[in-house]
Amino acid sequence: MCWALVLACTAVVLWVRALPSSLPAAEELTERMAWRKVRERLAAEQTNRPAGEEGKARVEEAAREWVENNRAEYDAAKASLTVQLKSDMSFEAGDGRRYAYLGDFDSYVWLRNARNYLRQGTTCDAVVDGECRDSYGHAPVGSRMIYNRSLHIAAIVGVHKLATLFNPGYPLSASAFLVQVLVGALGALPAFFLGRHFGGNLGGLFAALLISLQPVFLYRSLGSDNDVWNVVLPLFIGWAALAALKSPKILLAGTYAVLAGAWTGIHASVWRGWVFTYAVVLCAALGYLALVGIRQAMREGVRRLWQAEEVRKIACVVVAYYVAAGLFTLLAGAGDSGFFGPLQSIAADLRSRLDISEKAATRNLWPPVFNTVGELRRPYSEGIVRLMGGALFFFGGWLGLLSLLLPKRGWRWPEFTLAGSTTVLHVLGYYVFAASDLGNAVVLLFALLPGAYLIFRVCSRSSDRNFDPGPALLILVWFIVALSMFYYGTRFSILFVVPFGVAFGAGADRVRQWLAGQMLRMAPRFPSIASAASYAVMLAVLAPPVLAGYATAKNHRPDIHSAWWNSLGKIREESRPDAIVNVWWDYGYWAKYAAERRVSHDGGSLQTHLPHWLAKALVAPTEAESRGILRMLDCGSDATPLPEGAQGAYGKLRATGLDDVAAYAILLKVVKLSRAEAERYLADRGLTPAQQRDILAATHCRPPEAFLVLSRDMMRAEKWIRLGTWDVARAYLAHRTRRLPRDLGEQELRDRFDASPAEARAFYKRLAAMESATEIADYVAPPQRLISREWVSCGSADGGAEMSCRIAVPHEGQTKILYFLYDPALPKEGRLKDDQGEGRPAVTLVAGAERLEESAALSPEFPEVGVLMDPANQRILIGSPLLIRSTIVRLLYLGERYPKYFKPFDRRSTLLGDEVTTWKIEWEGE
């Protein structure tokens, strides 16, 4: 029965994980698209329909009636859309078959490394002084390759070699997809046996399916990133550790501990975060040793402590695991982290918190790039509850954890106190205050309660001598620490999947036993029926999370599509081998793989200044400034604080003795100037001729052929824009000058920023008045957005000459209507109108026949709004003034009409509305 369940779980996981390969998401999308097309067409025909909800209902009814009467036509249209959409999401391989693109962004770094190995026998692009280098990242300086010896790469290579034995044309990306399918299914084995220890076969079934099909785990791993290993390998580590803790013999326990250490070493070859599971197991084993030692000392005295076989066994487990993990992680290339990793992490955190040096004071001068990464967004408790399946399921996992600690019967006041207090704490933390920032405080309090109960239960003279706290402590520590990490970013949700699934499975079996007992009391003559009914009830409970996992896999679709793939393919085919592709970091790994060209930055650039500079180039108000920043990046990059940062202009300015603010201000000025002007400017700042030449080599070199690739999807994410509007000088003022005493603050404004005494007093007063984090953030990086991401059509107002453009503006959960009115003969005089009044926007840009004309209002009634007008096509774009004037808006929305330094190279779109545009950067001319 046991192995039959394991095989069944494995088969289900294999099937679910393989679903995205057939692109079922395309069929779901085309159903909605076909219905929307019908509805929009009928809405356009019903010109006299009532306004509001009544009109919408009438259109919906008409659409349903049309589909019923024209089913064949509707199905044919839907089938045609499905073919088009699947074509956008797939490619034709060498064997003549179509395969879905690999799913996400980071999966392409592993794919490129695997391709490197298959082509040249090493994952490295080059080896310099014994260091494996990525020559395609941080162009032109390159970067150190971190995961060059990853098991994930080896698995892709191995699967591909096996697959091509049977099908030589089998694509490498399909082999990478198979890796996550096979490894994910393999995880059902340890998950089942972990759950089985605490909850029998039912607990094993719950654990295997809840862990393997958890939506957040599937979402993060179906794209073939290495995250599948970061759940499966901890499962094997936990399984071996559990076997070590519960083994009756010292030799067997030590053997299992060494096996757990070996699995830890394998994990270290896949992910730098392997220290998490290692620390959990080590802390649980040490805690177990402490509990057993206390119990033994209380019963037989401290002097006889070491004579107890149980104490010696657990001590053997601790030492064996510590030594084995240290050795195996050392072999995996993790250095001495296996011996000192947790202590090093704690020490680094303390140093960071206690650092009061000048360097620490200016650490926040540069934008927090990681805050723009969606998976690192810090969730509140309500978000965690939602991601884990909802309130009832999250509470079920919580109760399951308690079931590991509490006896099945014979409760006394300690048991009732623990159950009651933790339930109250759960309700307060995850329901009453779920939308507040109290998450980790709740976790800390929750950790104290079971911890105190365990100590009481182990040390109590009336306690059950057969109670073994070790296995329960392993899951308890894992659950608490993983839940705490969850609050540091949704990325860490996968760390919580394993302990949650095991705890839920244990609780499910406890509930089943209780149900069976209650049913047996009602029908004592039918014990088999009572048992079967209790199992049926619990299997029904398992259905929703399994279906949620199925839905996640079914709706999964690749982020990359044919527009991206073909655009990058054209660069590969028509550019020089040393060309550089400037593309937002999300898409950098795609460009390195598909275009096979160097990129200015990618997903490995988040800790550097590079995202800030590219964002600043995109929001720059002039082409010249945008090109100047891109030239600086393509001449010397700015990989600060990495060692390669010294080769960039910013690093060279800092090397002259300038501080962060001064170096940044000079560089921002230099990139806007011609080489001759920049040379004079640097000389005026007191830099020597040698320093000038060194800096200009990194700002005004003759760069290689370069491209800028943009996606319309970028306008849907506004966080990156704030990286471009970020000002280092303002950050210094907000985070340092503002915190100084008034006299010192005013003096710094006079000395550093050349303010007059009156200006310094007024400016310091303004700085000191800023209190909220939002106010400070908006000062340092003014928020910018497009109110409408698509062109807004305009029409004649009341049949007259004046044109009217109606804009729907989302505002505090409602829709506010805004109008832009203009005379076609005098478009610059256009004005905005809302329910509060009428007046000029801050800036108006008019796309004329020959050039883009700009008009700025001296005293605008709408200072936070800018308008881009296209009178010839009777449409406008409306948004924040800086963004409306930006390079990215001009290139994406006005296309080929005005660029001087950005030459059109390629433009492609998809059925879902994304558009990818490629521009060749013209370096000649000032």
Image (cartoon, rainbow, N blue to C red):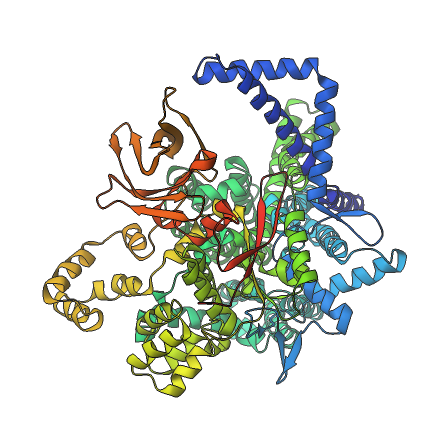
- Decide if residue 447 is on the left or right side of residue 604: left
Residue 45 or residue 414, whichever sits in front: 45
Q: Position of residue 478 (x, y in %)?
A: 54, 56
Residue 713 or residue 279, whichever sits in front: 713
- Where's the N terminus, which quadrant? top right
Q: Position of residue 261 (x, y in %)?
A: 65, 69
Vertical order, 184 against 36 (above or below): below
Confirm whether residue 327 shows in the render: yes
Q: Quadrant of residue 913?
A: top right
Q: Position of residue 627 (x, y in %)?
A: 46, 63
Q: Position of residue 274 (x, y in %)?
A: 59, 65
- Where's the C terminus, which quadrant? bottom left
- Decide if residue 500 is on the left or right side of residue 570: left
Residue 693 or residue 336, whichever sits in front: 693
Residue 199 or residue 119, whichever sits in front: 119
- Decide if residue 661 is on the left or right side of residue 154: left
Q: Quadrant of residue 504?
A: top right
- Decide if residue 668 is on the left or right side of residue 11: left
Vertical order, 308 against 372 (above or below): below
